[in-house]
Image (cartoon, helix red, strand yellow):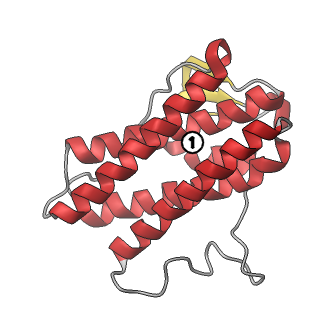
Amino acid sequence: LPNFGISSALAADLGEGDVGVLNYAYALEQLEAAFYTQVIETPYTGITADETALLTDIRDHEVEHREFLKTALADGAIPALEVDFSAVDFTSRDSVLGTAKVFEDLGVAAYNGAGKLIETPDYLLAAGKIVSIEARHAAVIRDLLQPNSVAFAGDDVIDESGLDGAMEPAAVLAAADPFIKTDVTAKAFM
């Protein structure tokens, strides 16, 4: 059974069924909310007012997603995760926006890959609404990286059929692992 994370002192098992899928999304939203909170608290060198406004909006959305999932999970929610952003240079625009691109593309692929695991229609509807916002974030970040480009979604995330990519939970958690100190296990759907 896979273990993701580097700290044996802290651990969180996502659970099974819809609770497991919602905790999976909750873990990713915790990561994104923590990242954008740090971005706004310690803005990179040369950040513009427009960039600050966009990144603040994204932060606010990620916090709202995190809190929505925490409320939906109630007593079934995993604990707050300890994150590790030591690989991110928060003074560098390229480092921050490059990491944001990774997180947003990963978030879209994660929701797309987990949708098939959701059993309750209301949860599937909520996940669809969240993934559409994550995709908007991904497009904005790509535009910040390549202003006025037509590459708002490239071959790295869109397949030959014009569909967004999807990733299985194990692959998503492995990709997020360098940024999460808490051991996150997902025994039920790995």
Which residue is labeled 1 in the image? Answer: 177
- Residue drawn at point x = 69 percent, y = 33 percent: 22
Give whichever of 9, 180 is nearer the camera: 180
- Residue drawn at point x = 56 percent, y = 41 percent: 28
- Residue drawn at point x = 67 percent, y = 42 percent: 126
The picture places residue 186, in percent across and down from the top left corner, at 75, 31
Quadrant location of the C terminus in the rendered image = top right
Give whichever of 36, 98 is nearer the camera: 36
Tell me: 186 left or right of 37. Answer: right
Going by the picture, which residue comes out furthest to the left? 46
Q: How many other residues sit within 10 Å of disc 1, few (<14), some (14-19) or many (≥20)?
A: some
The picture places residue 116, in percent across and down from the top left corner, at 84, 49
Quadrant location of the N terminus in the rendered image = top right
- Residue drawn at point x = 31 percent, y = 59 percent: 54
Q: Is residue 67 visible?
A: yes
Q: Is residue 88 visible?
A: no
Give whichever of 129, 171 is nearer the camera: 129
Q: How many marks?
A: 1
Tell me: 31 left or right of 128. Answer: left
Q: Is residue 3 depicted above or below 158 in this figure? A: above
The picture places residue 180, in percent across and down from the top left corner, at 50, 36
- The picture quadrant where one finds residue 61 is top left
- Say what amino acid the circle numbered 1 marks: Asp
The picture places residue 157, in percent across and down from the top left corner, at 63, 72
- Indicate the secondary structure of the residue bearing disc 1: helix
